[in-house]
Amino acid sequence: MKYFGRYLLFLILAALAICPQEAIAQETVDISFGRDACLLGSAAGLFGLSLILQRDMITPDPSTLNPQQVNIFDRYAIYKCSKTAVVVSDMTLLTAFAGGAIIAFTLNGGQQKFNDMLVWGESVLLTAGLTWVIKNGVRRVRPSAYRKSERGEALEKKSMRSFFSGHTSIAFASAVSAASLWSLRHGGERAEKWIWGSLVGTASICGICRVLAGGHFPTDVIAGALAGSLIAWLTVRLHDTTSQNSGERTLLKLSFQF
């Protein structure tokens, strides 16, 4: 963690360096009070629902857990418990989160800066809310729980929140929303590939490390990546004002007509 402050400073300087100043007045994202209040309210509702779902969560008897009942594709994660992977997954989550926020913040100025940050924030909040609802609703046992059962250790409630990976979903939501906002404003520029590659690559490393750490099954990570990416993409497209996406935006807005 001692290097994170330096790395965060590097991200800020890099974002400031690659954001073209001549695009500062470009309006490609719009905000609507009704629509965005609905999105933020939905996020709050998801968090509230997750709290309700966790009330009756009961941990299973460790003796009932059998690794052979886990599908072959996922079984690999049961025998992984890298402490280094735990640290790397936390660091890459922070990097994807901070990197996405910095890029969204430095893309534009004035009202558009607020718009970009709001869209990015909605993507992350909606993803986090849905993640916790699914975790507390599905209650899939983590890979590490199978190792604890072999040692006769008691399980905690957090052992029941394997599906899907919150680290991965939030990392991808931050990465995809920020990169999509970048493409809207500076699509076609040389830096676009670097933005997408660095953000999505960081989120991918986060997901891989969650498996190597024994915190999640591969399917947990895949589902988290898809959920975070889809929510981020839809949220950005819902606010997109560019002509090439007008059809998508009109279709998406049908859900918010009262």
Image (cartoon, rainbow, N blue to C red):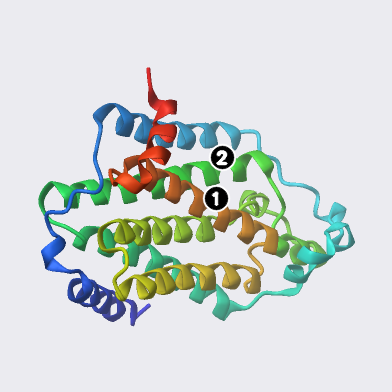
Bin the neighbour count of mark 1 within 10 Å (Cα to Cα): few under 14, some 14-19, many 20 and up: many
197 vs 54: above or below: below
Q: Position of residue 15 (x, y in %)?
A: 23, 72
Q: Position of residue 103 (x, y in %)?
A: 27, 64
Asked whether residue 97 is in view, the answer is yes
| Foreground residue among 216 and 115 | 115
Q: Secondary structure at mark 2?
A: helix
> Which residue, as the protein is rendered here, is positioned at the far front?
244
x 38%, y 77%: residue: 1
Q: Position of residue 145 (x, y in %)?
A: 73, 60
Image label count? 2
Q: CA distance from mark 2 to mark 1?
A: 13 Å
Query: Which residue is the site of mark 2?
Result: 133
Q: Quadrant where the C terminus lies?
A: top left
Label 2 or label 1, whichever comes before in sequence order = 2
Q: Secondary structure at mark 1?
A: helix
Query: Which residue is the site of mark 1?
Result: 227
| Foreground residue among 198 and 57 | 198
> Which residue, as the protein is rendered here, is positioned at the far right?
68
Image mark for residue 154: none
155 vs 207: above or below: above
x 87%, y 59%: residue: 66
Bin the neighbour count of mark 2 within 10 Å (Cα to Cα): few under 14, some 14-19, many 20 and up: many
With 257 as the anchor, is 144 left or right in this view?
right
Give amino acid for label 2: Val
Quadrant in the rendering for residue 81 = bottom right
| Foreground residue among 30 and 218 | 30
Give amino acid for label 1: Ala
Q: Position of residue 13 (x, y in %)?
A: 20, 76
x 38%, y 55%: residue: 177
x 55%, y 31%: residue: 52
Quadrant in the rendering for residue 74 = bottom right
